[in-house]
Amino acid sequence: MLLLALPLGWFVVIYLASLVLLLITSFWSIDAFTTEIVQVWNLDNFQTILTNETYRTIIFRTVWMAARVTLIDAAIAFPFAYFMARVASRRTQTLLFAAVLLPLWASYLARLYSWILILNHSGVLNWSMQSIGLPAPNIGYSETAMLVVFCYIWLPFMIIPTYAAMERVPESLIEAAHDLGARGWRTTLDVVLPLAMPGVVAGSIFTFSLTLGDYITPILIGPGTSFIGNVVYSNIGIANNVPFAAALATVPVAIMAVYLLVARRLGAFEAL
Amino acid sequence: MEGFWTRMALRVWVVLVLLFLFIPILLIPAYALNSSKIQSWPLTSFTLGWVNLTLNDPEVVSAVGLSVRIALVTTIFALVLGSLAAFAIHRTRFFGRDAISFLLILPLALPGIITGISLRSSFTFAHVELSIWTIIIGHTTFCIVVVYNNVLARLRRTQGSLFEAAADLGASGLQTFRDITVPLISTALVAGAMLAFALSFDEVIVTTFTAGAQNTVPIWILAQIRNGQRLPEVNVVVSFVILVTIIPVVVAARLTGGSGAARVQAGR
């Protein structure tokens, strides 16, 4: 018990207290002239977020981005994980596993920055397309660019749990499906896919939540449109309206809470 | 079992995904050795000029120094707190144990911006001036989990009979700890430390909110990317950061048979 006192004390005093304070702050407001925080309880911040057209658009745009990233990553990850779990030899499996983990750990900023180099006007993408005779896609600093980059940085988070779930599918079930006359594709769709689904959902928790909370990608890669993350960020920095930023920051947390409840029903927690 | 063409298609897919994952990372070192000041493709000619310039840039050198100091202190804090928590959770069953283990994971599960702004507003609230120490506090909060996960996983795989045998043979609690526990968990500790160091060295979001005027390496990189004037130097620094973050992970993976690095979700 004594062992736990130190780390737990750290967590409760520093981290948990801060989270609670943030939640409390979201019910306060700031003085328009002095920008000092006024500690009077009110629901103004939440009212603004829910009723103001601008914020609804921002929330919708962010959720729509997160949903697309999640679907695309699932589509990329599924065949990859299928190969790892069901076709590759043990040795290849280990190698591929390491190959997926390495980019996950290589600096986050480095991975973002590399896409600025690739997608900019005179970058690798435009050059490669033109050299095979296609028109230059010119997607630098656009929402398409953000979509590509989000899919890239969170892809390993989708591959790993999908692979883990697929590897647990018993070989006997697949043989049974074959014995009962199911062709290759039929087995994949009716046996492997449903059993691997908790893994995909587990991965989607990461791709979805990380996209909702990110503010650096919209700033560095995007066309300057607002997403939840960078609006929270600018309310801390330039506008110095911490109560409003705190209120807006509860939006992704609330969305994730709902998402986690659904995910739990789909059995994703066993696959984490 | 899968047909020939299905296997071929899957192979092609895997190669494409691997290219997608690795080309961007390999591209930056290539740009760092490119002589052109403008960041465009194709590359022009080889030079070590930017590397030299960057190594002699006092701003970069001091940022690296600061980041290394922060990462080292963070690692020590995380090692002590993380392994204490792992011992406690492993050894005892008590009311609220699951809640505590959930609480420890929270800083990695919540978006970094939430950890960042909540810490910042409590520092402001408590009139704590932002400094290198507030950065270290922020980093320690999410690095504890990395050590905790690694040590706990190792303890769970260790047989309790080993500790009992030591006690039966008359070893005191301290002796058992020194001769049995420490050797058993030492590689898990090293792996946890490596990962904590890499995580802290590369962290940008929590740092943005907990730093005062301090320029860590990621803060410097972010500022220079937005500013756009010194991209050749950015290429060199970013290549260096890739190395610093990847090497500890490879070592940690070797020490824990791959599982250590996988278990940690480097969520931001």
Image (cartoon, coloured by chain):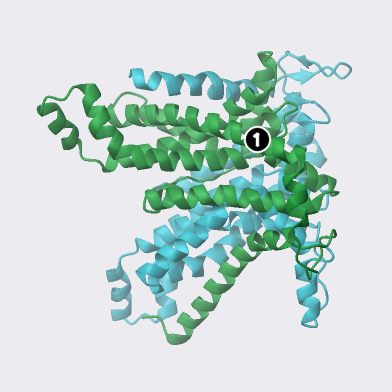
Chain colours: A cyan, B green
Q: Is residue A9 left or right of residue A206?
A: left
Dot 1: few (<14), some (14–19), or many (≥20) neighbours within 10 Å?
A: some
Q: Position of residue B214 (x, y in %)?
A: 72, 29
Quadrant of the image occupied by residue A16: top right
Q: Residue at x 21, y 40 (%)?
A: B159
Residue picked out by circle 1: B65
Q: Quadrant of the N terminus of chain A?
A: top left
In-front residue for pair B182/A156: B182
Quadrant of the image occupied by residue A73: bottom right
Chain where mark 1 sits: B
Q: Residue at x 66, y 19 (%)?
A: B123
Q: Position of residue A113 (x, y in %)?
A: 72, 53
In-front residue for pair B232/B140: B232
Label 1 is placed on what type of residue? Gly
Q: Is residue B172 above or below residue A144?
A: above
Q: Position of residue B97 (x, y in %)?
A: 36, 28
Q: Position of residue B232 (x, y in %)?
A: 79, 54
Quadrant of the image occupied by residue A72: bottom right
- Can the viewer see residue A145? no
In-front residue for pair A3/B6: A3
Q: Residue furthest bottom?
A: B4
Q: Is residue A85 above or below residue A69?
A: below
Total residue callouts: 1
- Can the viewer see residue A55? yes
Q: Residue at x 83, y 62 (%)?
A: B36
Q: Residue furthest right?
A: A33
